[in-house]
Amino acid sequence: MKQSENQDLDYPFLLVTHIVCADQQIHSEESKALDELAKQSQVGTRTLAEMEKILAQDEQQLSVAEIALRVAPKQRNETMWQMLSIAYVDGFCSTLERQMAQQVAQIWGWSDGELERQIEETGAFADTRFIVGGNKEEVSLGARMLKNADSLLSKALVDKLATFSRKQQKVEQLRREILLSGLEYDEVIHQCAVIAEEDYLFGERALKYTDKALQNLGISLQKAIAEIKDKSSEKGANSPAEEVANQLEGICKELTAKIIKKIDGVRESLCSKERALNHFSIAFMGKTKVGKSTLHAIITNNGWDAIGVGKQRTTRFNRVYEWKNIRVIDTPGIGAPGGKSDEEIAKSIIDESDVICYVVTNDSIQESEFSFLGLLKQKAKPLIILLNVKYNLRDNRRLEYFLNNPNKLFEMKGKSGIGGHINRIRSYAQKYYGNDYFSIVPVMLLAAQISVETEDKRRKNELFQASRIQDFLDSLRESLMKDGKIRRSQTLLGSTVGAIEDPLKWLRLLSEVYANLAQVLKNKREEIEKKIYRSRQNCLLFLVQEIKIVFEDALNIIPSFAEDYWDKNDRELKEGWQTKIKEIDLEKRLESCYKLASEKFNREVTEVVEEVGSELQLIAQSEAFDLSEQDASFLDNSFVRIASSFVLIAGTIFTFLTPVGIFAGLTLGIFGTVLTTINGLFKSIDQRRTEAFQKIFESLSNQVIFQRETTVKKFESEFSKSCQLVSENIDDYFDNLSRELEKISEESELTKRKLESGVNYLNRAYAKRIIDLLTENYEPLAEVRINEIIGKVRREFGKKIIISTKTQVPISKTSEEINLVIQEDVTIKYIK
């Protein structure tokens, strides 16, 4: 857009809209605040249209950078304050929200210190995450922010934030809502909050320890790069050290980039745990058009305007609704238009969710839609499957038929029964989730939706009851009331292990593969030396034979030369012999012999080195099978990089050129000796011819043979020196490369042990919480008590956990009951 076309746009308001979307979640309170800000600040229709584009992630939307550049300098300070204030509406400024603020600050030329100061000031009075039971004094947020309220937008923001801070908004409590009330509920919520804070501290320590360990690994690799460069500069250009430096620098840079991604994953996990700290979170997931938004609206009584025939999604982000200490999250559809980005957005909420409700329909049950459950199991997330039974109740006759016998559509047996659907769902889900410790709850969401739409009270009650949505709500209520404490521990301790397991699995293989690679290079070195020595001997033999063939031609022309020049003087003899030597192209043929032998040797060396490269690629393919596709591809690329480098270096540092001056003086040596003519007045012509012929023949033959032997020795010496230099270069290269790869392996192994320590730390804390559940005796989570009760913990993450205790544990549940709650195979052993 041109500037003239944008002159009526409210750019500060549009930046606020972008910050609402920054964390890929549209929080209900942020959404309400944005709507009210738009009304109270009276933004124009073109600004509202642009706001809708941002919320819908329309390709034509104005970007953050475009908007930030158009905010007038005198508005920037207040605009940043507005952005950060709205970011803290949900009580948490996420990493992604901070990153957007940093992007805007950079565009405006702000210093990091200036931005951090404003973030701290905003967060200091907006952060209410740790208020438990009203013990923390609530100071008027609006009063503290009024001094910044210069614009109409900021004043509207103050009013809205003050309202949120005092928790004055009223929510209609319908009987179908999950929002609970009563002393029992309040007590459970309080216990969950206390447990969450204790568990979060353990998770935070482990994640920060992991973060630091990964950072140190990155620093070590950077040091390794510097050391390699220093060594290579000492050796000079095109040296083995320089080639090793080039290869290792590329690998270390890739490793560093991968480490940064792993660190980002750990930090994002920590942020998600912090964001969910004071809430019991339920996320609705499933493919598009299965009824997630309808379910979300039924439970929260919010968002009905986005549901119905022909309605489009107003956003491609997660929608978050909060009431008291419960969060209900609606995610974009898996496989929805927009593709992979939608699925990534849905995945982003898994870490902070206590229970995942996976919604499916009976009209299209396909195995492919259940593969997503494998990720839930990898994250060790409890699962409830909601079967939305589809039946067209918009047809009045069908509606009456349904209400006359609402149980018929829920019967398990018969042609119209849902038993077959449930069996198929359980079969597919179990395949990817790894067990069947999940419940499948059938409901009819359309009946519940129509119950909201109708004005007929009797019909409203009938429809809601017939929808069986209450069964689902009861299962969620039970999950909170009965298992809320362990669910919080699963999120903040149990599944946090997954955030460490991801880089840990990568480090395990990294350490092993690079150690194996270094060992292969060491093992191959002796084999390569033998092959190169054999090649050297064969090529020398080939060179000598070729030299002898060339000189044999020189010997063969001596008889005819002697016959033709027996009566010539010394000058004529020399000139004639030079002509003959040139005719047989002696010098060029000898040069060609050396070149052919060199090429033969280089070719055989290249083949030997390429064999090592091929073997490295085979190792990569066999070793990287247990990683994610992205990580396996990275390791494979590292091996391909090294393997392909062998072909390159075989043509440079592992080859040699013909030494300068090796052919100098070859022909001069042959005709350099003066050949004296035969004189004799009293001898016959035949006698003189015979004697002259014999003398020329013997003289030239002796010189050619002598020159042949001299040339062979000279060529052998120079060729051997070049071969030896190649061998030394290869040894040097393999020594340096294997040593540096061993360093990478050792650093990875050291970091791996640190991460394993963090995993063990979390698993032991989680095991203690499981013991608390089994003994129905929750107590403060402390390392002293963990060490007193918990011996060893062995865990196959997401599948089973074996807890060895140091004391007898009075278990009040059966193994089946324990497994159903934890949704992993749990074994308790007492170590005497």
Image (spheres, helix red, strand yellow):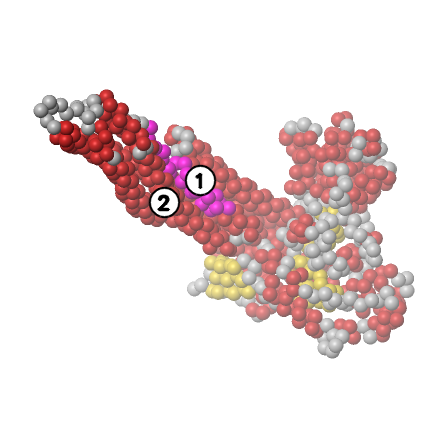
Instruction: In this rendered view, identify the residue nearer to me: 415 or 710.
Output: 710
Q: Farthest residue toward the right?
A: 456
Q: Where is 802 relative to 341, above or below? A: below
Counting from the top left corner in percent of width and height, residue 279 is at: 68, 52
Counting from the top left corner in percent of width and height, residue 215 is at: 52, 40
Give the amino acid type for the residue marked by disc 2 in the picture: Glu
Residue drawn at point x = 67 percent, y = 27 percent: 109
CA–CA distance between discs 1 and 2?
Answer: 14 Å
What residue is pinned by disc 1? Answer: 648
The part of the chain drawn in magenta is 637-660
Local crowd at mark 1 within 10 Å, few (<14), some, or many (≥20)?
some
Looking at the image, is mark 1 or mark 2 earlier in the sequence? 2
575 is within the stretch colored magenta: no
Q: Secondary structure at mark 2?
A: helix
Disc 1 to disc 2: CB gap under 8 Å: no
Instruction: In this rendered view, identify the residue nearer to me: 320 or 767.
Output: 320
Q: Where is 641 relative to 429, above or below? A: above
